[in-house]
Every structure is written in structure tokens, then in C-alpha cells.
Image (cartoon, rainbow, N blue to C red):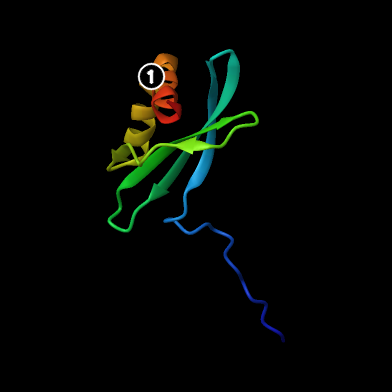
Amino acid sequence: MPVSQVRSNLPDPSEPVLHDLQPVRYDGQLVAVRLAVRRSEDGIWRARIQFVPVAEPEQETAEIFCATSEQDLWQAVRDLREHHLRDLYRSLVT
């Protein structure tokens, strides 16, 4: 009887997974916001913010989020307000 091979389609934990956040309004336009989350080899959860404006180059922060659990990381993200995200984006484009 032939043996079927099982292949795992699970992503590499060190590869970031993108999550869409609420867009922010900057200078009259909506800017899409994504969070790139990954788990590093030492087991720490890390994330960076990506800003994707329409018809302009994508901008991203360094890995400014760091937590020992995914839940703690998301709590830190939820604590950000729109004006914080707008200020982060402004710091990248000016």
C-alpha cells in the first residue's frame, strides 16, 4: 500500500505574519497600516509597523514591539491610539 506524504503548510515561525490594522488619515489621505509579527529564535514575539500609502513607497518601523507572549504583544499594539500611529508615520516620511 502506498504511503502518502504529509506536508506541513505551517509558516516558518521566524517569518513575519502580516495583520491589517485600522488605516490612519495623514495629510488628507488614508494610509493602510499593517503589523508584521514574528517569533524570534529566543521565543520572543517581535513586530514592526508597515505603512502603505496610496501611490507612494511603503514605509516601516524597526521592530518596536517586543514581548514574551503573543498576548502581551497584542496588548501593546491595542494601547496605541490613532494619533500615535500618525506621528510614527510622520516621523518616517519627513
Residue for badge 1: 84
Task: Name which residue type carries label 1.
Answer: His
Q: How many marks?
A: 1
Is residue 12 or residue 81 the one in the foreground? Answer: 81
Reply above or below: 1 against 14: below
Q: Is residue 42 above or below residue 91?
A: below
Q: Hey, which residue is sitting farthest right in the picture?
A: 1
Q: Position of residue 23 (x, y in %)?
A: 55, 22
Q: Where is residue 45 shown, x and y percent of the image?
A: 34, 45
* Numbered disc 1: secondary structure: helix
Query: What is the quadrant of residue 58 in the picture?
Result: top right
Q: In the shown orientation, is residue 34 left or right of residue 7? A: left
Identified at 52% across, 42% down, the residue is 18
Residue nearer the viewer, 36 or 71: 36
Taking the spot 35% from the left edge, 28% from the top edge, the residue there is: 75
User: 42 left or right of 11?
Assistant: left
Judge the density around disc 1: few (<14), some (14-19), many (≥20) Cα neighbours within 10 Å.
few
Which residue appears at 47% of the width and 54% of the height? Answer: 15
Q: Quadrant of residue 25?
A: top right
Q: Would you say 22 lies left or right of 49 here?
A: right
In the rendered image, which quarter contains the N terminus?
bottom right
Considering depth in this image, is 94 or 74 the residue closer to the camera?
94
Residue 94 in the image, given as x and y percentages of width and height: 42, 25
Q: Residue at x 44, y 26 (%)?
A: 89
* Direction front: furthest residue: 94
Q: Position of residue 36 (x, y in %)?
A: 46, 42
